[in-house]
Amino acid sequence: MIIINAKFTITEAKRAEFLEEVTQLIEATRKEDGCLSYELYESTEQVNVFTMVENWRDEQAIEGHNQSPLLQQLFKNMPEYAEKETVLNVAKTIA
Amino acid sequence: MIIINAKFTITEAKRAEFLEEVTQLIEATRKEDGCLSYELYESTEQVNVFTMVENWRDEQAIEGHNQSPLLQQLFKNMPEYAEKETVLNVAKTIA
């Protein structure tokens, strides 16, 4: 299994717009082949700091996801939403 | 780097107690050798569903963490706090 943690730090002004767009992305992504889970979380310490916790069957499933129009749209819009750069970690499960 | 995602589903009745205990664990863990980040997040869709997103330098750092009295205490108390079993994923970064 492959895990992706994508950390987004969003401006207060763009919070609502970001959440609206991400909600559509989540809904579509969960239907994608090889998507085991795709969940958005918010930091309990810092408002507007989110991490998407993603579990994927394999690299092939992620390649499919990377073609998703909604994902591409989000990454295009991120400079407008973001307070800080997105931090992306991709890892293969070992236990 | 090694990523751990630990997902906790907590009862509403034990939310406050869980958060108090986890806050102490977070504070102590961030001082541990090899702890790169250790952050608690709550699901944006389901209240009382949390994921700890952990980034560790290597296996050795995690072994040290597993000896932490506060971590052992939390795992001892979890049956009392938990609505569902804890889901633990450990992964080595590939990108």
Image (cartoon, coloured by chain):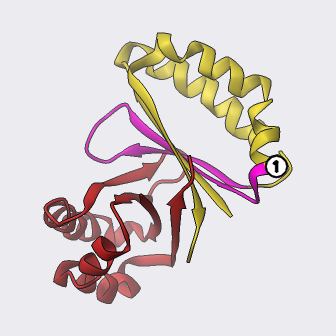
Chain colours: A red, B yellow
Quadrant assignment, res A27: bottom left
Asked if residue A58 lies in the magenta stretch, the reply is no
Circle 1 residue:
B60
Residue A64 rendering spot, x and y as whole percentages: 24, 79
Is residue B23 depicted above or below B43 in this figure?
above
Residue B7 rendering spot, x and y as whole percentages: 45, 38
Farthest top residue? B80
Is residue B29 depicted above or below B13 in this figure?
below
Q: Relative to the observer, which residue lies in front, A67 or A84? A: A67
Q: Is residue B54 left or right of residue B41?
A: right
Residue bounds of the magenta highlight? B36-59
Identify the residue at image location x=43%, y=62%: A2
Asked if residue B39 lies in the magenta stretch, the reply is yes
Quadrant assignment, res B28: top right
Is residue B76 depicted above or below A43 in this figure?
above
Q: Is residue B94 left or right of residue A54?
A: right
Residue A25 rendering spot, x and y as whole percentages: 20, 68
User: Which image quarter is the C terminus of chain B in?
Assistant: bottom right
Quadrant assignment, res A29: bottom left
Magenta span main SS: strand
Q: Is residue B75 left or right of residue B14?
A: right
